[in-house]
Amino acid sequence: MKAGVVSSVFLALVLVWPGPVRAASPRGQVAQDVSDIVWCYDEDRDLVTRKPAWKCADRIIDEAQARKIRLQRTRRIQGLIKEPEPFFPGQRLSGTGSGFFVTETGSVLTNWHVVDRCKGISFTPASGKPLVAELVASEKLKDLALLRTSFTPAGVAPFRSSLQPDRSEDVFVVGYPLHGKVAIKPILVAGHVVDAGSSQRPGRFPMQIDVRRGNSGGPVLDRAGRVVGIVVAKVNTLSVYAETGRLIRDVGIAIRLPVALDFLKQHDITIRERSAAPPLSITEIYSKAHQFVGQVGCWR
């Protein structure tokens, strides 16, 4: 095609091009440019959205009307959502830990630091609803506390008769670790005893296991699902590294059985003791623990 012809065609296209496209007007309104963003009101759903005018098949409204409709909708929704009643009126949940039933009459063992200075204490069994728990006894030095509930548990934690865990022995912690939010069901984590005699504090032993805040007060179980300790803390990785230059991760600390049993004996608690028991699968350990573990709530 010759240059003169091309120029003529181009000029013709320019002359007949209709200019900006106008969107079809919904419900008889003035047409809008495709680039216009409008408030579109869906009357059937009582919903206001921002969208291009050509996509609005409903009624276009101005910003003041949109603000009013959205506010009314928000208030209606808020009226339908009722805030849950606090478990202890005037108090809020300030912290959580773990615990476990040690008697058929609803006695629970946990850590002292979990319930320290709480104005109200709740205990939620893994298989039940929150209960009001009464603090019966506590001892700061041992970091243990005994609670009383009105609940009859499906199972009671069995304790191992041999009081000393073996080095490198497999252990399992079942509790309510915090992973950025409060856990709503028990979680099992597996690990092993580091060295039963290596703890710097008497009455404690270290474990290579991922315990977190919220696990405190929960049981440490052996392969047969028997209690061999009570979770009390985890090693502070950053602090240890700053002091020693050693990077230590996932090391938890447990209270030894003799310390826990002495505490329970002082308060007339008779435990269920098992000297011999077959090893269980992880699923079986969790299933049995589910009968006696629960979450402790501190309300202030």
Image (cartoon, helix red, strand yellow):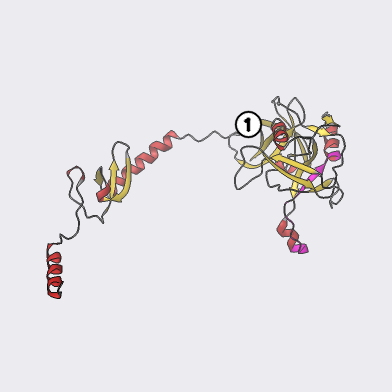
Which quadrant would residue 276 be assigned to in this image?
top right
Residue 143 seen by the camera: no
Q: Is residue 52 above or below residue 57?
A: below
- Residue at the image position 66 percent from the left and 44 percent from the top: 177
- Residue 54, position as x, y percentages in the image: 25, 50
Residue found farthest to the front: 1
- Residue 252, position as x, y percentages in the image: 75, 48
Q: Is residue 75 above or below residue 129?
A: below
Residue 290 seen by the camera: yes
Q: Which residue is mark 1?
A: 130
Which quadrant would residue 216 be assigned to in this image?
top right
For the C terminus, give its image quadrant.
top right
- The residue carrying pointer 1 sits among few (fewer than 14), some (14 to 19) or many (20 or more) residues within 10 Å by Cα, namely some
Does the magenta segment cover residue 249? yes
The residue type indicated by label 1 comes to: Pro
Which quadrant would residue 69 be assigned to in this image?
top left
- Residue at the image position 72 percent from the left and 52 percent from the top: 250
For the N terminus, give its image quadrant.
bottom left
- Residue 211, position as x, y percentages in the image: 71, 47
- Residue 150, position as x, y percentages in the image: 69, 25
Does the magenta segment cover residue 110? no
Q: Is residue 202 above or below residue 135?
A: below
Element under disc 1: loop
The segment highlighted magenta reads: 242-258
